[in-house]
Amino acid sequence: MGRDDGRASTPLLRVEDLHVTFNPPTGPVRAVRGVSLELRPGEILGVAGESGCGKSVLFRTLLGLAPASASVRGELHFEGWPMAIDGSLQAVAALIQQNPGAALNPVFTIGQQLRLVAGSDDPVVLGDLLARAGLPEPRRLLGAYPHEFSGGMLQRAVIAMALATRPRLMIADEPTTALDVTTQAQVLDLIDELRRRDGLAVVLISHDVGVIRRICDRVLVLYAGRVAETGATGQVLENPGHPYTRALLAAIPRPETAGVDLAAIAGMVPDGREPIAGCAFAPRCAHFRAECEATIPALRLVQSGHFAACVLVEESP
Amino acid sequence: MDPSDRLPPPSRFGLRGLPRRRGLPGVAGGAGGDAGHPARRLGAPGSSVWYFRRSRLGMGAAGVALVFVVAAIFAPWLTPFADAGRGVPDLSVRLQGPDGTYWLGTDDLGRDMLARLLFGARTALIVAVGVVALSVVIGVTVGAVAGYFGRWVDEVLMRITDTFLAFPPLLLAVLVAAALGASLRNTVIAIAVSWWPWYARQVRAQVLSLQRRPYVRAVQAIGVPSHSIIVRHVLPNAMAPVWVQATADLGAAVLTAAGLSFVGLGPRPPTADWGVMIAEGRQYVLSGQWWIAGFAGIAIVVAAMSFNLIGDVVRDVTDPRTRGEG
Amino acid sequence: MSRGSRRWAGYLLRRVFTSLLVILGVVTITFVVSRLVPSDPASLYAGARARPEQVEQVRADLNLDAPVLSQYVGYLGDLARGDMGISFATKRPIAEDLRRFLPATLELALSATALAVLLGVPAGVMAASRHRRLSDTGIRLLAVTGVSMPVFWSALILQLVFAAELGWLPLAGRTEATTVFAQPTGMFVIDSLVAGDWGGFVDVSRHLVMPVVVMAAFPLGLTIRLVRGTMLEVLGSDYIEAATVARIPRRTVLWRLALKNALLPALTVLGLTFAYSISSAFLVEAVFGWPGLGKYLTDAIVRVDFPVITAAALAITVIYVLVNLALDLLQARLDPRVELA
C-alpha cells in the first residue's frame, strides 16, 4: 500500500518533541504535548484527530502562526539541517487553509495577489501557475476578483498562490472540508498530481478518515496534543493499534456498515488546561485498565513502521 | 438596498456589529464567546466580567465613574458650601483664586467652585442617564418592532430612522433644544430625539438575526402572541450590545449636553451646569481667572473619558478576538 | 461592459432618489420642529414694541394664519425656489447669508477632516499592528481623550496658551484687518493663493491652525478607533495570514493589502469625520469668532431667530447628505464586492 519503497532516506522534515503551550489570561493551555514526526520527500502525510486534538496548532506553529504569547519548545530539522522551531518553515512551506473563500483577499484581483507572492509581473508566469493548479483560461482569470469564483476554483486559486512561493512542502489544513463531494475529489486529485509531478511533499490535516485513506502514504493520529498512532495508511486503517483510532474509524460511514448505528465516541477531548497523568484517552476508552492512569504510554511497535501509544499493543501482536 | 444596509452603522464613537472571528483552534473562548455559555457564573474565569476586572484601564475608569456618581448623589453632604452649590451668590468673595477655604476658587458670583462642580455633577448625571434611558426606550421599541414584523413596517420605520440619522450629530439636538426652549428637561428630550435611531438600527439588526434562531421559530409555531415573543424571547437576548453602547454613550451625553449649555441651550441659572460654567468663565480666562472654566472643563473631560473608556474596555472583553487588553 | 454601466447608472439613480427622499424627510422634520416653538413667530418678527394689528399684519404676510398643511406646502415651494425666508433679527434674506457664510465653514470643516484622516489612518494602522503593546495603548488613550474633550474648552486652552501666553498665533478671526485680497471662492486659503498674495496666505493659515486643530480632535479620535478596529479585524483574517506565510513583507501586508481592506468599509469614516467637523462648527466658530455658518447659527440661537436656526441646520444637513451620497457612490465604484443590483 505504501507508495515509497521503504528505503531509509534523509527525511525532508523532522520534528522532535514539540511542545506548544498557549498562555491566555485564563491560564496555560497545553495544546501540543511532545510530538515527533517525519515527512519524507514526495510523501503525503495525513494528520488525523478530532477537533481540538492539536493537529492544526502543531503545523501552524511551525509556520510561525502561533500567538506571540505562546511558548514553543522542540527541534526542527529540514533536510537534516536544524532550523528555528517557530516559524522558519515559512521559507520552504506553503499553507492551504480550510476556507478558500476567506483565504484570498476580496478587494484585489487574483492576478494582483499572485503577482505579489510570485514576485513576477509576467502574465505567462502567472497564467502558468493557475494552469498548474488546473484552472482553465488562466490568462482571463488573472483579472477576476475572488467573489467571481466558485468554491472549487477558489481552492485551486489558493493552491496556485501556494505554488507561486515555490514551496518544498505544502501544509493543507482541512483543504476539502468546505467543498462539496465532487469538488473534494478533484482537489484531492490535484494535490496527488502535484506530489507526483513536482515531487511536492504534503501534510494533509483532516478529521475525515476517508480523505486520508484516499491519498495519504502515511498517517499520524493525534489525541490531546500527543501522537496516538502512526504508520503507513494501510496498516493503521486496516489494523489500528490504538483504541482511539478504532473509535475514529467506527465513526465514519462505510458501505459495509450501512444501516448500522455509527459509534460516536463518548466524552470530550481534554482541553489542555488540566494536567493529564496517564493516557489522555483513558477516560473515554472501552479497554480502560488501572495502568492506563499510571504513566503516559510510550509508542510501541505494532509492526514495521507502525506504532501506537497504547498499553494494549504488546498483548495483541 | 442602499449601501448603508450592507454595513452596520458605525457608532458615534467606534465600530459596532463587527462579525466575530473564530479563534485559533485550542485557544480559550473560540467563536461565540459568552453567547455560548449562558449558564456561566458571573465573574467566573474566562467570562467578560472576569476579563473586565483584570483590565487596569477598565477598573480605573470604573472607579472614576463611581466617584462621579457618588459625588452627584451626595453633593450637598460633601461640601460646606452647599448653598453656593445650589446657586446662592456671595458677592464679597467674587473670583477668589484657589486657596485653603475655596479649594478650587470661587466664580464671578462668589460661589465655591468645588460646590458648584459637585452640584454640576448632579445635572450631568441626570442629563446623561435621562438621555440614554429615553433613547434606549424609543430606539429599542422602534428597532424591535421593525425587525420583528419586517416588510412594510420595517421599511417605513427604517426610512424614518434613516432620516433622523441624516442630520449631523448635535445639529438636530440644537434644533430641537432651540425650538423647545432652554431647560434641563428639554436638553434631555433634544439629545434623545437625535440619538434613538442608533439604538433602533442596532436592535433591529439583533432582532433580525435572533429571529431565525430555532427557539424563536418554536414559540412562533405554538402560537405565542407577537408582543410576548418580542418582549420575552427576542429582546432579552438582543439587549447585551445595547447595554454596552448605552454605557459608552453616557460619556457622549455629558459632552453633548455641555455643548448645548455652552451655546445657551442648557439648564437655566441657578442650576449648576458644567457647560454653562465654561461659557461664563470664558471671559475671565484671558484675564487670569482660569479656574472657573478650567475646572469645569476638567470635570467634563474626566467624566466623559471614564465612561468612554469603560465602553471601550467592555467592547473589548465581550469580543473574544480582542480580549485581555488594557 | 455596457451591462455593467447600465447597472451602475441604475444604482446611481436609485441612490440619488433615496437621497432626495431623505432630504424631503429632513425638511419635514425641520418644519415640524419649527412649529414646536412655544413663542409666537409673528410677534417675534414684528418686534417687542409692535401693536397687535401690526402683529396680525405680519402673521398674514408670513402666511402664518394658514392651515399647517398649506404652510408646509408653501415652505416646500419656497425652498424649491431657493427662498429660505427672512431673518427675524436682521430682516435679510437667509439664503444670501448662507451663501456668504458657507465657504468659511467649509474651509474649516474640510481642513479638519483632512487633518483627522491624514493623522488618524496611519495612527489607527500603527495601533492595530502593535496590538496590545505600549504604543497601541498610547494611541488608544489619545483617541479616547480626543472624543472626550469639549471642543469649546480645548479651544479656550489653545487660545490661552498659544495666543495669550506665547503669542504665536492670532486669538480669533479669519485674517488680520490689513490683509486684503479678492475672494472669488470665499475659502481664503484658495483665494489668497489664486491672488498670489503670499503674505495673505500665511496670515490666513495662521488663523486656521487653532480652529482646525480643535475641530479635528474629535473626528481624529473617531478615525483612529474605527481604523484600528477594522484593521484588527482584517489582520486576523485568513487572507492576511496567507500573505504572511507567503512571506510578503510586513510593510506591504500592512500598508498595501490590509489597509485597502480596512479603508473600503471605513470610507464611511470620512463622511462621519466630516459630519462631526461640520456639526461642531457652531461651537468652534463661536469661540474663535469665525464668521461661518456655525457662528451664524449660534448668533441666531441667542436672538431666538428661528427661521435662521432652521435654515442653517437644514443647509448643513443637506450638505452632509450630499457628502454621504458622494462617498457611497465612490465606495460602490472602488469595492469590487459591492452588488449594485
Image: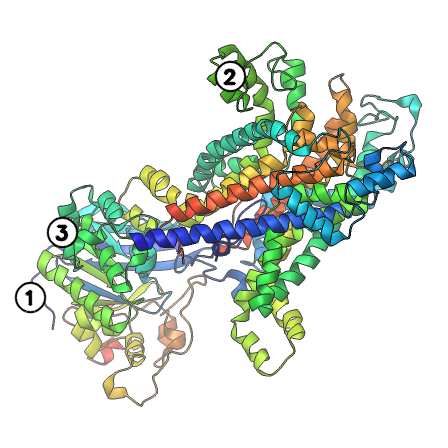
Q: Badge 3 is on which residue? A: A128
Q: Position of residue A148 (x, y in %)?
A: 30, 58
Q: Badge 1 is on which residue? A: A5
Point out the tag, 3 or 1, that comes first from the N-terminus: 1
Q: Mark 1: which secondary structure?
A: loop
Judged left or right of residue A67, residue A170 is left
Please name the amino acid that badge 3 sits on: Asp
Query: At 40% across and 78% down in the image, what residue appears?
Result: A266
Judged left or right of residue A19, residue A77 is left
Tag 1 subunit: A
Q: CA distance from mark 3 to mark 1?
A: 32 Å
Q: Where is residue A137, by image quadrant?
A: bottom left
Q: Where is residue B291, by image quadrant?
A: top right
Between circles 2 and 3, the one closer to the viewer is 2
Please name the amino acid that badge 1 sits on: Asp
Q: Is residue B37 visible?
A: no
Q: Residue furthest bottom?
A: A259
Q: How is the image coloured?
A: rainbow
Q: Are marks 1 and 2 on the same chain?
A: no
Q: Nearer the viewer, residue C70 or A41?
A: C70
Vertical comparison of C53 with B234: above or below? above
Neighbour tally class for label 3: few under 14, some 14-19, many 20 plus, Cα within 10 Å: some
Between circles 3 and 1, the one closer to the viewer is 3
Q: Position of residue B251 (x, y in %)?
A: 67, 43
Disc sitting over residue C192 in the figure: 2
Judged left or right of residue A285, residue C37 is right
